[in-house]
Amino acid sequence: MLSRTAENLYWLARYVERAEYLARTIDATLRVTALPAAYIGKTNEWDSALLTAGVAESFYQTHEEANEHNVVDYLSFSADNPSSIRNCIEAARLNSRSVRTALTSEMWDTINSAWIELQAVWSKGTSTREDLAKFLRFVQETSLRFDGSAYRTMLRNDAYWFSRLGLHLERADNTARILDVKYHVLLPEEEHVGGPLDFYQWSSILRSVSALTAYHWVYRETLKPWLVADLLILNGTLPRSLASCYDNLVRNLDQIGVAYGRQGPAQRHARGIRNRLEHSNMNDIFQHGVHEFIQEFIADNSRLGEIITKQYLI
Amino acid sequence: MAVAFDEMNIPGGDLRPAYQELARWLKETPPEALEYRRQEAELLFRRIGITFAVYGDSESTERLIPFDVIPRIMSGKEWTLLEKGLKQRVRALNMFLRDIYHGRDILRAEIVPDDLIFQNPVFRPEMNGQQVPHDVYVHIAGIDIIRVDAEDFIVLEDNARTPSGVSYMLENREIMMRLFPDLFARHRVAPVERYPDELLSALRSVAPNSASGEPTVALLTPGVYNSAYYEHSFLADKLGIELVEGRDLIVKNNEVFMRTTEGVKRVDVIYRRVDDDFLDPLTFRPDSALGVPGLMSAYAAGNITLANAVGTGIADDKAIYSYMPEIVKFYLGEEPILKNVQTWRCREPKDLAYVLDHLGDLVVKEVHGSGGYGMLIGPAATKATIEAFREKLKREPEGFIAQPTLALSTCPTCTASGLAPRHVDLRPFVLTGSKSTTIVPGGLTRVALKEGSLVVNSSQGGGTKDTWILDE
């Protein structure tokens, strides 16, 4: 397939995944900030939402302080923020248009309808919390529909694999960023372990990757930082865990390698990361430092993106 | 101006046979149901994204072409005649192009004046003596046809460069079948859906000899911002070929390759929807970012087929148009089946004098214009506009032709105040491969939605209809 087509599919999947992640981040933040002050602690949750979205620096270039109103607007609707939800959907639609031939009609319909709704219903942003909740649900449903359409209607060929690569790479990056921003509450040495403050922080982490229920099914325990980290980093059964993302990345890259009859640095690099995850345990990670571990992972993950681009997309 | 031919009703109250079933159905169908389906059709068009871009319109860069749910119907007999005339005309167009870029018999016979060719900006000297595979120049022709009475079809324009609209022909049918299954069950409508297959086999048949095995065909688009981008992606999809932009292609050793995830792959045939001027910055406009550097050398080396060929603009130029009847006779020795609109060539002093005297009754068109831009519609123009045009004409008479304002036929059309007659034209698509010329039964019917308006161009607010050829 055309390199440009593969590149568009890859980025399309990334944009859709990112939009959903931003919606989840806002949703989780709203929940925490609605709690009585004693449960929240001194941190500004809106600051941490900006950090997990990776846009704190650009936000502060035009804003003095982070509050619900301006952060929600910046993450959702701002034209100045290149990765606001609106810009993600617009970029996804533009990418879709230029690779329509590689999309199934269901995928196109999802993106195009979302784009139409964005303009028709959400062009002025949201004015009430109910409105915002509706908007966030719309974004999450768009992503689910898109993902589901791809899963159910695409041929299992390179077009599908490249779009999955974008999705899992983006997803791994998102999960890692949450962990990185919140790692201080995961440190077992911190005081008040198990207090209400940490409990709500952890549950908000889990919520932002839609893994709160999953946690209970997997561990049948009250929320513990150790286990939260284990779930998000090492548990291969959770679709958003780093381990699971890398199982998929390795598999999709192998499928491409087999189809093309050739392997390359992307396959090797992805396998290296997966093996490291496979041979880690939480004990080592905490010993080594969660922050350091995650920082390395984020760098490795974005390096994989560069390698894939060089090997296939240009 | 003559009274427009009514496609549905015979003066005096009878219906033309082809419309009888439709009329019965319209009587049974309440107007609300029609309106409901019209809205549904619009929603479908929007969701599928069947849009076109309007240049210089910042409000909305993508617009829908209005779709009218009342089909335009022609009898099989009428179509058979039209089809014969179209094939004849396109055969002559191809022979004319071959001649102009090679022996130039027609110039020596003094049927077409030399300067109309050699001083014409759409003439491509680069194509002189250039062999094109199978001598096919115009692989895809869109011939604009109007109807003025019960017997005659008249050609308004030959589009021999990159005619568009075929996606609307196909999508209009799909949407009609979805919305009006009952109406279809009551007619025998000849299908149009094999068009993409016919196009692909025509394109494959003209692959260069150096193509190995199954030729690789690609569609070259200027990109998502082009007004016909929807059509480009639609066709590439239906044909199962890559939709490429200039940046996806590279030329190496006079061969054309596309960049793929598995390395470069040779391309043999390019269905290009990029104008001559932008095809190759090394040969044509150096500022073109849409083209492929070196494409013309690969073309000259015979390693790539371009459809349509380079330089076909000379055949659909409005100045050449007026010679088409003579062109048909010259190459085929046959009487043209399809007539031309009477045309005054302003370059000829006698004609110019006539045109200047009758500006208020005529349509004056720029020789190189298209899409309804830069024309004067005498009967609808103000005095000031007419006078301004008079000056333009005197300054540059060779830039214009004039035609009588024709009474384009009318078809019943949904309007805000119910069904009403509106003027229509028809653009059938004629495909020429190495062995045969084919036309799927039908074409794109364009309709002027404003009462009395004769302008059917989508860029000027015209709409489209499904075109039914009844199988009898």
Image (cartoon, coloured by chain):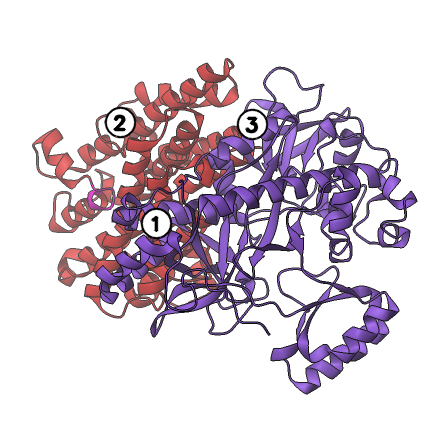
- The residue to which callout 3 is attached is B201
Which subunit holds the residue at mark 1?
B
Residue B116 at x, y percent in the picture: 85, 54
Query: Which quadrant does the N terminus of chain B fall into?
Result: bottom right
Which residue extends farthest right?
B108
Q: Amino acid at mark 1?
A: Met
Q: Quadrant of residue B32 in the image?
A: bottom left
Q: Is residue B458 placed above or below A288 in the rendered structure?
A: below
Q: Please report the residue visible at 74 percent of the width from the left and 44 percent of the height from the top.
A: B328
Q: Residues within 10 Å of mark 1 (few under 14, many from 20)?
A: many
Chain B in the picture: what colour?
purple
Q: Residues within 10 Å of mark 3 (few under 14, many from 20)?
A: some
- The residue to which callout 1 is attached is B176
What number is the disc on residue A234?
2
Q: Residues within 10 Å of mark 2 (few under 14, many from 20)?
A: many
Q: Amino acid at mark 3?
A: Ser
Same subunit, tags 3 and 2: no
Which residues lie in the magenta part? A206-210
Residue B416 at x, y percent in the picture: 35, 73
What SS does tag 1 mark?
helix
- Horizontal side of B6 relative to B189 (left or right) equals right
What SS does tag 3 mark?
helix
Q: Is residue B228 placed above or below A68 in the rendered structure?
A: above
Foreground pick, B12 / B208: B12
Q: Amino acid at mark 2?
A: Leu
Q: Please report contact status of discs 3 and 2: CB closer than 8 Å, yes or no.
A: no
Between marks 2 and 1 in the image, the one whose residue lies nearer the viewer: 1
Query: Which secondary structure class fits the magenta region best?
Result: helix
Magenta segment: does it hold A209? Answer: yes
